[in-house]
Image: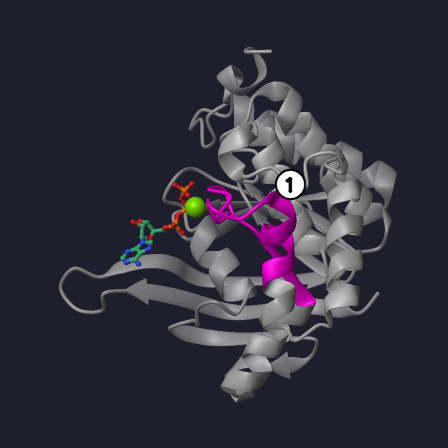
Amino acid sequence: MEVLVDIRDVSKIYNPGENEVKALDHVSVSIREGEYVAIIGQSGSGKSTLMNILGCLDIPSDGEYYLHGKNVKDLNDNELSDIRNKEIGFVFQGFNLIANLTAFENVELPLIYRGISKTKREAFAEAALEKVGLGNRMEHKPAEMSGGQQQRVAIARAIAQAPPVILADEPTGNLDSRSTWEIMDILENLHSEGRTVILITHNNEIAVRAKRIITIRDGRIESDTGIQTDEASDDAIDQAVSVEITGEDQTVEFDAEDFTND
Ligand SMILES: Nc1ncnc2c1ncn2[C@@H]1O[C@H](COP(=O)(O)OP(=O)(O)OP(=O)(O)O)[C@@H](O)[C@H]1O
Ligand SMILES: [Mg+2]
């Protein structure tokens, strides 16, 4: 598989000067097409900052980012927005749905911006909502749906045009355990269809479902199970997670309440 994402020595500094925050500190990572990667780390460790850079929503302060072998620095605004629109499906923790639009309209909206014809749009939006199990909720507005259903609408919106890359930032952060596992099943299916899935979480139980775990701490990569065969990757992941849970630093909090309120 080809290298999709190649981040070399990337740093991100917010508010350069007196109050500066080094959110990423010389991070290098490369991810191949079709991988299923979890990025874990404590609150404030730099996960969303990294996701914003991976998704071309933000630029590094220092270092290089090659996407499909092209240096993102050399892309113009049109090329960047093309990548964001066609290559990457974003799923955010807060759902970011529009309150007065139905599930169907929420999924359809970005397709309108992309200039897709009405017939195609309707077919794509319907198929995406069916895929996340919401074929019977298309006409519902966000307030008429559960948190898990809203998150599924957000996933349907992200996958409506079949982007090859899914970037999900804490997609299950606000969900009960049942909805959490439903969302994880959907992400896993997307991965088995051949898409690259990059999942950000602070929850080990969720991270172990991925094929590779990258741990980030204080803006640096602390560990990376790497690209592996399935079996080796299961072992490496078990190890990474047991270190995380039992290690003396307690890097990542185990978020038990996510799984108890069934
Ligand atoms: N726009 C910003 N301006 C200044 N500092 C920022 C900005 N965004 C993030 N930071 C800081 O950068 C660091 C990394 O933030 P980031 O949002 O990447 O963390 P995170 O790992 O996603 O945390 P969480 O799990 O809470 O979402 C934090 O210290 C944060 O306060
Ligand atoms: Mg974050």
Q: Position of residue 62 (x, y in %)?
A: 41, 74
Q: What residue is at 38 percent from the left and 65 percent from the top? A: 12
| 242 on left or right of 196 | left
Quadrant in the rendering for residue 120: bottom right
- Above or below for 43 versus 36: above
Q: What residue is at 68 percent from the left and 68 percent from the top? A: 87
Say which of 260 and 201 sits in front: 260
The single residue placed furthest to the left in the displayed view is 18
- Above or below for 66 versus 20: below
Q: How many marks?
A: 1
Q: What range is drawn magenta here?
A: 87-109
Q: Which residue is mark 1?
A: 139
Is 88 colored magenta in this rendering? yes
Quadrant in the rendering for residue 187: top right
- Residue 241 visible, this angle: no
- Above or below for 251 versus 79: above
Mark 1 closeness class: few <14, some 14–19, many ≥20 residues within 10 Å: some
Say which of 180 and 256 sits in front: 180
Identify the amino acid type marked 1. Answer: Glu
Q: Position of residue 29 (x, y in %)?
A: 60, 61
Say which of 133 and 10 sits in front: 133
Q: What residue is at 50 percent from the left and 16 percent from the top? A: 257
| Helix, strand or loop at mark 1 | loop
Work out which quarter of the rendered image holds the N terminus and state it.
bottom right
Q: Position of residue 233 (x, y in %)?
A: 78, 40
Quadrant in the rendering for residue 42: top left
Work out which quarter of the rendered image holds the C terminus and state it.
top right
Is 225 colored magenta in this rendering? no
| 147 on left or right of 49 | right
